Structure formats: structure tokens, C-alpha cells
Amino acid sequence: MTPAHRPHPGLAELAALLREGQLSSRAAVEEALARVKATQPTLNAFRRVRAEAALAEAEEADRRLAAGERLPLLGVPVAIKDDTDLAGEPTAFGCAGAFPSAAADAEVVRRLRAAGAVVVGKTNTPEIGQWAFTEGRGFGATRNPWDLDRSPGGSSGGAAAAVAAGVVPAAIGSDGAGSIRIPAAWTHLVGIKPQRGRISAWPEPEPFHGLTVLGPLARTVADAALLLDVASGNAPGDPHRPAPQEMLPAAGRDPGRLRIGLSFHTAWAVHPLRLDPQIRAATLELAETLARLGHDVVEADPRYGLVGPAQLPRALAGIRAWARRVPDAALLDPRTRSNIRRGALLDGPVLRAARAAERPLQRRIGAVFEQVDVLLTPTTAAPPPRVGATDGLGPAAMDRTMITTCPYAWPWNVLGWPGVNVPAGFTSTGLPIGCQLLGPAASEARLVSLAAQLEADRRWDLLRPPAQAVPSAG
């Protein structure tokens, strides 16, 4: 890890430079595209790059800026994950095959464009977002800019690698079982899983039967909050519509004195938890920081109950449903095909029972918020794995690896509630560690305020990956 040396500007800073005329959108987008080209042979963060279209949009943004138009992200380059429709580009979601181009933008892309953002490309993700690493036969392996032998996590691993390496200042990912928070933890980023429905997933009304939401990854809390504000809102067909909140003002607001519940407890699983001692120590250190900042930190464990049976049918039925779009199922990973078969068994009555369990689980698990305002937990139980570590594993061994490595994030997807990963330090070998701030329904503003207070104290934003791991665009 190294202190920042001529760091690339963040999202808000870049937007300000463009507004003030100190930088053109053409120059900003050209530099982002040059960084994509320079890092693609090593990081492999992008599945699609739209250089010609992005440069044309940048030139249009410059004309609008010169005419006095002002929008939150006018002319700013960003990236989206390849599970999100972008007109004229295929949506392969990590799968191999000749997918057709999307006919229209997803609602979140429409909102990014309405704010003036320039989407430079679509980032890599494992097949149908299933795994906590970003590797696949459709695109190869995406690598972690903090250590090129390691994975950036998944399933928003390409987005995390691109932001951590400074290729783009921020990106939109998705989180169905920790898929924003896990890669954020493993690449030293802020990753926000918002309340279900905060950002529309349209044309998907409820991706993975309500488990998956879209959210931002950025180096700072303010940048993540800005992107969340820009992307938030609903399409007419959305079934979930939380009351609007402004996140960027929350990032500049003192959270007040909060009751913080420290928990290392996980939902029951067949395979026992093995928490890495360095991650445990980093979580305890973050708890001590919160206490020093004036918060009341106590031990508090949620009563998870049978949350697992409420998650698995929704995830596997969602994989099966998405797989119907794949042009050639023979190209899928055998473990994906196994999950498709399992999804067929768990669809129908089992899936309906899993959905019906959500409200009772919200009451049971949410009872912890009668004692505390926010939960603090590790984001993962282990540091980022080596690239290729799961090659050759069968479906059962893969499930065991996922359950033991990432047991902390997925219950909040069942509940539909928000969580924020914050950087929490490094292992002795320099691998990033993350912790989660978890809240009840629609508590993003509180979580953002608390995360911003931590950032102001710990200054994780000043650290960047080793220079040798991130080739220069020059």
C-alpha cells in the first residue's frame, strides 16, 4: 500500500473540474480510456469498452458545459457492470456466447445519462453473478490491483478493480449476496448496498426474486453517496419504492452519538465459520475507533434463525431464470448448469415459501435494532483468494468455499436492507480488509454519515494500490 501520489481525481472532484472549466470531458474520457487500455492486459476489468461512443458523448458534454449547462456528473466517465442493459451493447452477465445488443438502456443507465455521465464501458462479472471471485470462460480472470495474484472478489469484481486502480472514479455494481460489499472489502473501496428499490433495476422488476440491488463503488464515502443520489429513483413498474433520501448531504453530516453493535456471529451453515484472525483484529480496531469517536459500542448478535432456506431458492431460481437468455448453454460452467438444475427443483412452492419467510425474518433479525442503531461486522471471513483457487472445484466444494469465505453479507439481501463496506486496514501481506456497517430498513443516510466520520478519522482515501500493479496510461 502506498500513499497517493498525483492521484486521479475522484467523482466529485472530477465533476467540479469540468464545471469550472479546468478540464474538458474529452480529456477526462480520453484519459479513462487510456487507463482501460493500459490496465486491461493485467487487471482485465472490462468486458466491453465503448471508446468511440464515449468520446462522442464527451464532446457533446463539452458543448453543453460551454453553453452553461450544469448537471451533477456532466461529462464525467463512469462504468457499469455487465449485468445492466446499455443500448447497443450486449448484456452477457459473465457468460460466453454471442448475446444480442440491448435495445434500450436500463433505468439506472438512463438516470446516469440524465445526470450527464459518460459510460465508458461494462465491467467483468462471473457467470450470472454466482461467485465471490470474477473469473470465467467467457472473459478470463479479473485481477486485484493490490496484488495481481489475487482476485478482486465478485461478483462486481471488474467494477471494483477498475475503481481501485483509478481507471474510473466510480462505478455501478450489483449485490445479490454481498457482490458489492465483498469486492469493495477486497480492493479497499467504499461499497454501498442500498435499500431494495432505492435504485431501480428496471427492466428487471425484482432481480433474483428480490435479492439483488444495484449500488455504487468508489474510493470515498462522498463519491459513493453522490453516485447513489444520481442513480436513485424508480421506473413505473418497480414493486419497491422507498421514500427518497439525499445521501450526499448525509456524508457531510455528523451522525450523532450512536449505539453500535459489534457482531462476529453468522447465520447457521453446514460448514463452520473460520474467521481469519487478522480480519477479527481489524474489526475490533474499527470498533475501538468508533468508541473513541464517541459512540457506544456493545456486543450484539442478530437472531438469524432459518435465513438460509429463505435465500437459497431465490438465488438458484434466479440463476435458472437468467440462464434462459444464454445463447448456448453448453458454454456455461458445469457448476452453473448444476445450479440451474437445483433452481428447477426449488422453484414453485419452495420459492414461494422462501419469499413468505422474508417478513417474519425481518421482525426476528430486526429486533437487534431495538438495542443498537447500527451493526458492525466483518465483510468477509478471509482475505481475497488467489486467482484460480477454485479451478476444478465441483459444485459442493464451491458452495463450501463460498459459505466459509463470505458468510457475513448475504443475510441482508434476504431482508432487503442497506449495508456499507468500509476499508478496515490490511493483512500483514498488504491485502485489503473490509468491515460492514449494517442497518434496518431505509437507514442508508445514517450509515453514510457514520462511514464518512470513519473516513475523516482513518483517511483510507489516501492509500492506493502499489504502482507496479497498475500500469500507467502514459
Image (cartoon, rainbow, N blue to C red):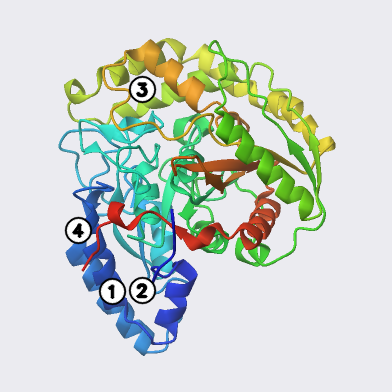
Image-based side of 434 in relation to 464, left or right:
right
Considering the numbered disc 1 on the image, is that residue within a helix, a strand or a loop?
A: helix
Residue pictured at 57% horizontal, 25% vertical: 275
Q: Earlier in the sequence, mark 1 or mark 2?
A: 1
Q: Are marks 2 and 4 in contact (CB under 8 Å)?
A: no
The reply to whether discs 1 and 3 touch (Cβ–Cβ < 8 Å) is no
Q: Position of residue 64 (x, y in %)?
A: 35, 83
Q: Position of residue 205 (x, y in %)?
A: 47, 40
- On screen, residue 151 above or below 41: above
Q: Position of residue 293 (x, y in %)?
A: 77, 56
- Location of mark 3 (residue): 320
Q: Secondary structure at mark 4?
A: helix
Distance from the alpha carbon under mark 1 to that under mark 3:
39 Å
User: What's the amino acid at mark 1?
Assistant: Ala
Q: Which residue carries the number 2 mark?
A: 75
* Residue 229 appears left or right of 358: left
| Mark positioned earlier in the residue sequence (4 or 3) | 4
Q: Secondary structure at mark 2?
A: loop
* Gap in angstroms between the C-alphas marked 1 and 2: 6 Å
Of badges 2 and 4, nearer the viewer stands 4
The quarter in which the C terminus is drawn is bottom left
Residue labelled with disc 1: 58
Q: Which residue is mark 4?
A: 37
* Of labels 3 and 2, the one closer to you: 2
Label located before the other in sequence (4 or 1): 4
Q: CA distance from mark 3 to mark 2?
A: 38 Å
Q: Are marks 4 and 1 in contact (CB under 8 Å)?
A: no
Amino acid bearing label 2: Gly
